[in-house]
Amino acid sequence: MNKHMRLTDNRLITFHLSGHDFAVPIEVVREVINAEKIDQLPGGRKPLEGLMIYRRDQALPVFSLTQALGRESETPGDLILVVELDGQMLGFRVEKIGRVIDGSGNGQYEPLEEELAFDPETIRGTINEKGLTVIVLRLEKVLGNVLN
């Protein structure tokens, strides 16, 4: 084993959406792709935007992350953050990818100081990273919002 390899990965990947900076654990992110042709499904409910062909032979459900967080979508974003949650591949629209940050700290996040129109259950807390306040999401709660 590489002596520099971590046994646990506490890194977070940041991204921008609806005027805020968010982060999710990098271990669940498979890749970031351009939002191309997304086919709407008849009778599909928000936050599901539709399906897109992923890796030539897979159907990837694409969701509005803003709507999954409990808020109306303002700008959908041109990128898809592909994540694997509970064995399911899902795509969430984001506007811009930021950077990878260390999310380990002491395992505690600061509470969200401003009141946002997001579902509070989806927010783990915040991290201040080099003067930037990043909202750390609970993806398991976001997944619950998209599946219900």
Image: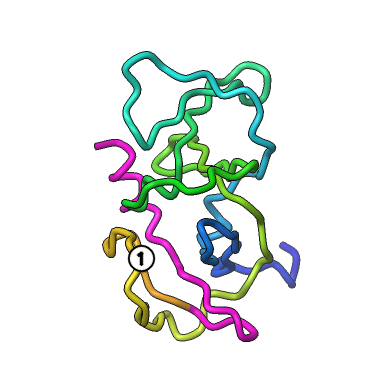
In which quadrant of the rendered view does residue 78 lie?
Answer: top right
The residue depicted at 32 percent of the width and 28 percent of the height is: 45
The residue depicted at 43 percent of the width and 44 percent of the height is: 85
The residue depicted at 59 percent of the width and 63 percent of the height is: 14
Q: Say how many tags the image has.
A: 1
The location of residue 77, given as percent across then percent down, is 59, 45
**Who is closer to the viewer here, 136 or 84?**
136
Up-down relation of residue 99 to residue 57 (above or below)? below
The location of residue 4, given as percent across then percent down, is 74, 72
The N terminus appears in which quarter of the rendering? Answer: bottom right
The location of residue 97, given as percent across then percent down, is 66, 56
- Which stretch appears magenta? 127-148
Up-down relation of residue 111 to residue 120 (above or below)? below
Left or right placement of residue 136 versus residue 78 in this view = left
Up-down relation of residue 39 to residue 89 (above or below)? above
Give the residue pinned by disc 1. 123
Left or right placement of residue 90 versus residue 80 in this view = left
Q: Dot 1, crowdedness within 10 Å: few (<14), some or many (≥20)?
A: some
Q: Residue pushed farthest top?
A: 42
In which quadrant of the rendered view does residue 44 lie?
Answer: top left
The C terminus appears in which quarter of the rendering? Answer: top left
**Who is closer to the viewer here, 89 or 79?**
79
Q: Residue pushed farthest front?
A: 74
Up-down relation of residue 142 to residue 91 (above or below)? below
The location of residue 115, given as percent across then percent down, is 32, 73
Q: Residue pushed farthest left?
A: 148
What secondary structure is found at the residue carrying circle 1? strand
Q: Colour scheme in the image? A: rainbow
Q: Residue 94: within the magenta?
A: no
The residue depicted at 67 percent of the width and 18 percent of the height is: 56
Q: Residue 131: within the magenta?
A: yes
Amino acid type indicated by mark 1: Ile
